[in-house]
């Protein structure tokens, strides 16, 4: 072999030079990195403190809290300790010990596994204490921002829900995500605070009306029900109910029926309640007068030039009726005859001016437009105008119905509805406050007042007589509509939508109240099942708002209260009962840094929030009203 001849000098240099260059490059790069300044770690994106959602009086409805994910490193657990650890924490985290132990053993080859997610602050504190006392190794807690809904299912579809990723998934939580939790700059070291949203609803009134609504659902065995109470003057919605509802604290376990925001997203035929808007349009356009008479013989029937037959039955043979009696008796025949007299385009223009066919623009997602046909629509027929006049062949939302009713309550000028009363920063400084937003005039003042007086007649002696109040004037209009048969087409013979509109007091309207009951069992006539609920709900609203009743009795009180001695107040894992306590009893608690007390008034505690027995959470605020 001629090995020496193979390794000639020139070949050695060809191999050696590139290797030497590579070594020099690696060494120089190492030296450069070793002596160069270390790069600064990028700032972690700051945690955003999500703003609270509260009612118009400041009662918390959605507040920021902390949850904890509990996990373990199975490899760090000795087998003997797995069972002991599982027994120690089982009751605290609401799991059974064998399941916990099985989960840890099944993950023996993993570096980490979660035992349970979203522990409350109290659960975390108890488990942490056990871990520290018994020196369990390999236990880890991940702190995550969360949301607590103190009132559970109260106004649940309105408030909405925040998911585990910190994003709102429905309701105000979704629609006002950027207000509640503004986006942050990645490099910003400053913690961000979202705004606090004060809703227009009154939580106490909401609770009272929901109680009435739930009782109604039970007695009528209805599939669903919704109710809206709005301030007729400024459009602020005081109560917003959609049943069935859902507990926001267990939202992920809810049925789909409980999450539907029916007053906003459901479009339906309103039936006879719509007659107040048809009558108003015909009167306002000068097509008819209050004295115009129509002969009701129990059926509206005519044939068109093309031979099409139109036939609409009435509830009775009402004889000669004017507008007032047509509404009082809910006469289909008279309303269909009215529709013949008004120009079709003009009639449709009035319907759209009331707001039907367009979203109201409230602060909620997925609001429906409803449906108002025009003459070019492929489904338009010769009977369309007559059936629209009595609330069929068009679809509306409950929000649209309430906003349209504000035109009748407001001398012909509707107002824009809203759910947000004001917005404040973390320090309570007001950044937005709602002001009345009138829309364009729809009716002459005289027209609106006349229709309202007709509604009062309907409450006094017509189809809405069960909604009548003894000491405050009220105007109503009821309606019972057949619902669509989604299987066979046409209208169902068994499913009805029963609804009623109310405005009160008639002399100076303050409240618009609207109730819808769907698919009640047995009795479905709105005058019998909805009108009484209107009366009950209106009574509750009147008392809650302190509206003056005719012949109201004034009560006298001596002004003296007898307060017995109490034991010392202690705030442990639950909120104590502060009712009847003087301010001096609070002094030992005011030094605590983990709880804030919001105190108003003088004397003794007459109201508190959260209520006695509620769980104490980190950095919670306890509100106390003294009188």
Image: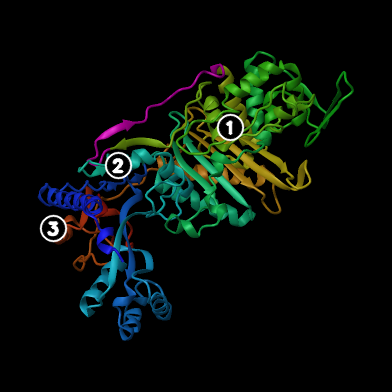
Residue at 37 percent of width and 69 percent of height: 113
Q: Quadrant of residue 124?
A: bottom left
Q: Residue furthest bottom?
A: 80
Q: Position of residue 346 (x, y in %)?
A: 66, 16
In depth, the one of 115 and 285 nearer the eye is 115
The residues tagged by marks 3 and 2 sit, at their Cα atoms, a distance apart of 27 Å
Q: Position of residue 363 (x, y in %)?
A: 45, 36
Q: Position of residue 526 (x, y in %)?
A: 66, 43
Q: Choose the circle earlier in sequence order: 3 or 1.
A: 1
From this view, report whether residue 370 is shown above or below residue 338. below
Verify whether residue 444 appears in magenta. yes
Q: Residues within 10 Å of mark 3 (few under 14, many from 20)?
A: few
**Region in magenta:** 425-445
Look at mark 1 in the image and give the residue it sits on.
369
The residues tagged by marks 1 and 2 sit, at their Cα atoms, a distance apart of 31 Å
Look at mark 2 in the image and give the residue it sits on.
194
Tag 3–tag 2 contact (CB < 8 Å): no
Q: Choose the circle earlier in sequence order: 3 or 2.
A: 2
Residue at 20 percent of width and 69 percent of height: 567
From this view, report whether residue 585 is shown above or below residue 56. below
Image quadrant holding the N terminus, namely bottom left
Q: Please tell me whether mark 3 or mark 2 is closer to you in this view.
A: 2
Which secondary structure, mark 3? loop
The residues tagged by marks 3 and 1 sit, at their Cα atoms, a distance apart of 54 Å
Q: Residues within 10 Å of mark 1 (few under 14, many from 20)?
A: many
Q: Residues within 10 Å of mark 2 (few under 14, many from 20)?
A: many
Q: Choose the circle earlier in sequence order: 1 or 2.
A: 2
Look at mark 3 in the image and give the residue it sits on.
591
In depth, the one of 360 and 72 nearer the eye is 72
Q: Position of residue 206 (x, y in %)?
A: 45, 47
Tag 3–tag 1 contact (CB < 8 Å): no
Query: What secondary structure predominates along the stretch shown in magenta?
Result: loop
């Amino acid at each position: 072999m001629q090995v020496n001849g193979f390794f000639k000098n020139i070949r050695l240099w060809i191999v050696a030079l590139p290797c030497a260059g590579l070594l020099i490059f690696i060494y120089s790069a190492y030296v450069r990195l070793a002596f160069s300044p270390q790069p600064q770690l990028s700032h972690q994106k700051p945690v955003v403190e999500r703003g609270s959602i509260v009612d118009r009086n400041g009662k918390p409805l959605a507040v920021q809290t902390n949850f904890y994910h509990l996990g373990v490193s199975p490899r760090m657990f000795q087998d003997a300790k797995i069972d002991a650890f599982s027994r120690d924490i089982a009751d605290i985290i609401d799991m059974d010990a064998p399941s916990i132990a099985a989960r840890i053993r099944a993950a023996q080859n993993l570096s980490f596994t979660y035992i349970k997610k979203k522990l409350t602050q109290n659960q975390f504190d108890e488990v942490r204490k056990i871990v520290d006392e018994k020196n369990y190794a390999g236990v880890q807690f991940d702190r995550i921002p969360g949301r607590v809904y103190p009132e559970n299912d109260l106004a649940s579809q309105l408030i909405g829900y925040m998911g585990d990723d910190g994003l709102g998934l429905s309701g105000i939580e979704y629609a006002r995500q950027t207000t509640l939790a503004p986006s942050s700059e990645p490099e910003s070291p400053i913690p961000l605070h979202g705004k606090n949203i004060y809703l227009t609803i009154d939580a106490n009134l909401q609770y009272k009306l929901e109680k009435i609504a739930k009782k109604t659902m039970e007695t009528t065995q209805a599939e669903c029900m919704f109710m809206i109470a709005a301030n007729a003057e400024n459009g602020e919605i005081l109560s917003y109910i959609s049943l069935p509802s859902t507990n926001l604290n267990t939202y992920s376990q809810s049925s789909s029926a409980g999450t539907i925001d029916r007053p906003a997203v459901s479009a339906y035929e309103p039936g006879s309640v719509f007659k107040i808007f048809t009558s108003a349009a015909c009167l306002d356009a000068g097509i008819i007068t209050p004295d115009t008479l129509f002969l009701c013989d129990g059926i509206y029937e005519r044939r068109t030039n093309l031979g099409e037959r139109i036939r609409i039955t009435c509830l009775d043979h009402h004889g000669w009726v004017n507008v007032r009696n047509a509404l009082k008796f809910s006469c289909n025949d008279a309303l269909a005859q009215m529709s013949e007299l008004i120009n079709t385009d003009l009639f449709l223009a009035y319907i759209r001016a009331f707001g039907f066919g367009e979203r109201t623009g409230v602060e909620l997602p997925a609001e429906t437009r409803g449906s108002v046909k025009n003459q070019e629509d492929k489904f338009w027929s010769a009977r369309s105008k007559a059936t629209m006049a009595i609330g069929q062949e068009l679809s509306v939302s409950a929000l649209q119905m309430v906003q349209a009713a504000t035109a009748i309550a407001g001398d012909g000028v509707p107002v824009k509805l809203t759910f947000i009363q004001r917005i404040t920063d973390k320090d309570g400084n007001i950044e937005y406050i709602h002001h009345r937003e009138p829309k364009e005039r729809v009716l002459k003042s005289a027209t609106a007042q006349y229709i309202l007086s007709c509604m009062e007649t309907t409450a006094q002696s017509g189809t809405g007589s069960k909604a009548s109040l003894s000491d405050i004037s009220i105007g109503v209009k009821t309606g019972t509509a057949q619902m669509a048969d989604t299987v066979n087409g046409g209208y169902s013979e068994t499913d009805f939508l029963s609804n009623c509109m109310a405005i009160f007091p008639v002399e100076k309207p303050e409240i618009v109240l609207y109730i819808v009951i769907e698919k009640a069992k047995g009795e479905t006539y709105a005058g019998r099942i909805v009108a009484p609920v209107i009366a009950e709900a209106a009574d509750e609203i009147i008392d809650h708002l302190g509206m003056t009743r005719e012949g109201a009795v004034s009560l006298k009180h001596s002004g003296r209260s007898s307060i017995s001695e109490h034991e010392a107040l202690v705030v442990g894992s639950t909120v104590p009962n502060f009712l009847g306590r003087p301010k001096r009893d609070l002094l030992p608690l005011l030094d605590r840094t983990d709880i804030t007390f919001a105190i108003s008034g003088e004397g003794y505690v007459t109201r508190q929030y959260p209520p006695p027995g509620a769980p104490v959470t980190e950095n919670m605020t306890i509100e106390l009203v003294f009188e």
